[in-house]
Image: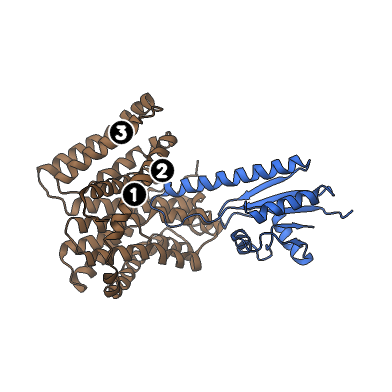
Chain colours: A brown, B blue
Amino acid sequence: MDPKVEWIGFLAGFGSILLTFLAGAEIEPEILRRYGKESLSIGFFSFLLPFLGAMGYAHYVAHWSPDAAQICGIALSTTSVAVVYAVMVETGLNHTEFGKLLLAACFVTDLGTVLALGAVFADYNLWLAVFGGVTVAVLAVPPRLARWFFRRFSGHVSEPELKLLFLLLFGLGWLATKANSEAVLPAYLLGLVVAGLFKEHREMVRHLRTTTFALLTPFYFLKAGTLVSLPAVVSGFGLIVVLLAVKLAAKFLGVFPLTSAFRFAPKSGMYTTLLMSTGLTFGSISALFGYTRGLITQSQYTVLVTVVIASAVVPTLIAQSFFKPGREEAESGWRTGPAAANLPEEE
Amino acid sequence: MVMFKKILIANDGSEGARKALTAAIQLATTCSAERHSISVEEDLPQYVATGGEFEEMKAQRNGFFEGLNAEAAAEAAAADVKLSPTWSPATKSSPLPPFCKEAASTCWSSASWATAASSSAFGAALRRRSPAWRHAVCWW
């Protein structure tokens, strides 16, 4: 398979946009509101320090170009909400207050990643202003418009609701491309906006997932995988290890002190830090964005994708082996302090 | 007649577990013991692209085990035996039902086991949860 063939590129790109949209639509707005202070601060620093750390190392030590270093920073700043969620379901932590706060913080981190991806390489011209204006307008309208549209047309076999979503995603994506920004940015934001509505239309979401995972994401992952060069993995092995260490260290500096400030028990804080060090989907999307735009070489792309995959596995294994708090420990570990005392009760 | 108070069947839907279920139902017809079956959900993916992808796969596994338990209850009912099936989700922190804990401590010491699923992945999952779990049926 030649990943540079145009139709494969189109399907892969559409797959990555829908993946991003679905990731955004998984947030529970109520959880984000409830844990606003904690999730915003942990999520923001979980993005910022790895972004700066990985970018700085890539540029000043590995001597990557400024653009390549920025892609490196963005790709390694991510947290994989999906991996964190899967781990927490296995341990039962997804039902705890602690787990919900952690997921909310992961969403904030990923928002930082897509904002950086959309803003860092954009041309600051009229097209960007148009893109920004239309995006704000579109994001303000959909909840009301989509609610009416979904109610009016749901149940049709031709799925007009999905067509409306595709229209919005393609339209905003086209504007983003004209502004040299990235289509995943409006996709994630649109997902966040319609997240509440999606909870009411589970069958439609299932159909969208089926379309995405059966048809589109295989092309995305095939494209992302076939661009990885095995010789580059071997020759860049040292850099892969160092960049993984840089990501883990930066996540530690960004997240662990805040967990202490919010009165997490040390074990829960370390567990949170390690889970927030995981990365997968957005990291690979960022690396592929950099390669297809010619911002990084195939060797650099290979290094980044390998670090991203390793960052999904290594922190998870360490966290599960040495720092996994029990459910009661997780709850009591962060609810005993004065910060927790101000939290409202779960509904 | 041999009298047992409780019979527990571990059921993962495998060939061995089905044989164990049939054997346990036959055993149950000879006494008035409490009959339980337990199924433990496992092998859910950990590295997924979105949380929704994980949710879909979990729902699929849940459906499989619900169907399995309904089949087991129906097979027992056909033999005029009442069976209480339970399935445990793949959460290591979720507590095992009391009868499983009792079985783990009692059957291990009395060695009253049938060999049916000792080599299956299910057996491995049970051993992870409690080293006493080795086979598909125990009674005490």
Q: Decide: few, some or many residues near mark 3? Use Cα within 10 Å; few <14, some 14-19, many ≥20.
A: few
What count of labels does the image hold? 3
- Taking the view exactly as shown, the residue that stands out farthest to the top is A152
Look at mark 2 in the image and give the residue it sits on. Answer: A28
- From mark 3 to mark 2, how far is it between C-alphas? 24 Å
> Callout 2, which amino acid?
Glu
Look at mark 1 in the image and give the residue it sits on. Answer: A217
Q: Nearer the viewer, residue A87 or A4?
A: A4
For residue A297, which quarter of the picture? Answer: bottom left
Can you tell which mark lies on residue A163?
3
For residue A250, which quarter of the picture? Answer: bottom left
Q: Nearer the viewer, residue A26 or A140?
A: A26
Q: Residue A241: x percent and y percent? A: 32, 72
* Residue at the (45%, 60%) spot, across then down: A263
Q: Decide: few, some or many residues near mark 1? Use Cα within 10 Å; few <14, some 14-19, many ≥20.
A: many
Residue A273 visible here: yes
In the image, is residue A314 above or below residue A91?
A: below
> Callout 3, which amino acid?
Lys
Can you tell which mark lies on residue A339?
none
- From mark 1 to mark 3, how far is it between C-alphas? 18 Å
Of badges 3 and 2, the one in the foreground is: 3
